[in-house]
Image (cartoon, rainbow, N blue to C red):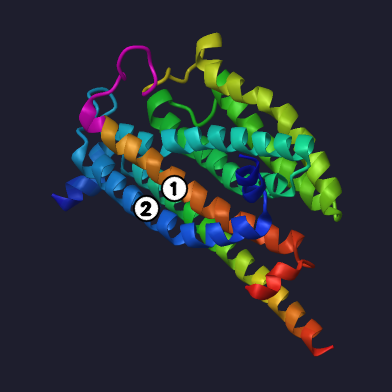
Amino acid sequence: MWKLFHQFGSPPHFYRLAGYLIPWFGAAALILILIATYGGLVLAPADYLQGDGFRIIYVHVPSASMSLFAYTLMATAAGIGLIWRIKLAHAVAAAVAPIGASFTFLALATGSIWGKPMWGTWWAWDARLTSELILLFLFLGYMSLRAANDDVGKADRASGLLAVVGVVNVPIIHYSVEWWNSLHQGATIIKLGKPAITGDMLWPLLMMLAGFGFYFATVMMIRTRSQVLQRERKSQWLKSL
Amino acid sequence: MLSEFLHMGGYAGYVWSSFGLTAAVLLINLVGAQRQFKQRLAFVRRRIAAEDKT
């Protein structure tokens, strides 16, 4: 068990393993996203209320889910890095931040584009929208804290603390539509009983979510490898690359 | 048939801009990550080559 733990935390081991996995994960992401896009734009029937406008769901919901997943992962990795002083954990957190920021931006932007025809407005200072905007600021704050510190160790500690404290925002975003009166609709997939969506509409959504997950893992591994190269630039094992 | 598909029941501008923006952001992210990795790998290799000379 400890050996496994140690191996996971070992930068050279991670570097090699990620090198093998990246092309496979990238291919899986591409295939899943392409099929899901076809399913969502062509095969799924139009919504009885929103017509073809509802198809924005296929990029909006997976982006929003990934933004929350990314933040939770970043905060967990940063926390592990702070508590057990595992450098690879900080490397993962730093690698996740730009991807998380991108998905948060996409969730906000596609939500805004969707909101215009359905709610009649691009933006409202609503609980769900505002808390998601705060998530974007947390990602950007984390990244600028890192950029402002030339010393990697200091950058890890300062940015890691922000990431861990900011995690309170994640449940707030998730439950915002229940706790406050919101323009935003409630959950579509995860509901007690069965999903509030028909099967023809559901499978492209789940497939897009899986595709985004593989995409996320692919880019995260590439960025973590870059982090490892930068942090380990004085290590001997790099000579065997 | 195709024009009907592209029309998206009147929501063309909204649907296509959402999908286009998503594709663009995901692509930029991937290309940026790969470019950064290649730069750092080249840097490490140059450094090792320079150390071997001395």
Q: Is residue A137 visible?
A: no
Left of A175 or right of it: where is A149? right
The residue carrying mark 1 is: A214
Instruction: Please tell me the numbered disc located at residue A28.
Output: 2
Q: As rendered, which of A75 and A24 lies closer to the eye? A: A24
Q: Is residue A200 above or below residue A157?
A: above
The image quarter containing residue A224 is bottom right
Q: Is residue A216 visible?
A: yes
Q: Is residue A235 above or below residue B5?
A: below
At 62% from the left and 32% from the top, the residue drawn is: A133
The image quarter containing residue B49 is bottom right
At 82% from the left and 41% from the top, the residue drawn is: A157
Q: Position of residue B51 (x, y in %)?
A: 80, 82
Is A97 magenta? The answer is no
Alpha carbon separation for disc pair 2 and 1: 7 Å
Q: Residues within 10 Å of mark 1 (few under 14, many from 20)?
A: many
Three-letter amino acid code at the position of disc 2: Ala
For marks 2 and 1 on the same chain, the one whose residue lies earlier in the sequence: 2
Q: Position of residue A31 (x, y in %)?
A: 32, 53
Q: Is residue A174 above or below residue A3?
A: above
Q: Secondary structure at mark 1?
A: helix
Is A200 magenta? The answer is yes
CB contact under 8 Å: marks 2 and 1: yes
Q: Position of residue A50 (x, y in %)?
A: 29, 27
At 58% from the left and 60% from the top, the residue drawn is: B33
Q: Secondary structure at mark 2?
A: helix
Q: Is residue A150 above or below residue A239?
A: above
Q: As rendered, which of B11 and A19 lies closer to the eye? A: A19
Find the magenta span and give its range.
Answer: A189-201
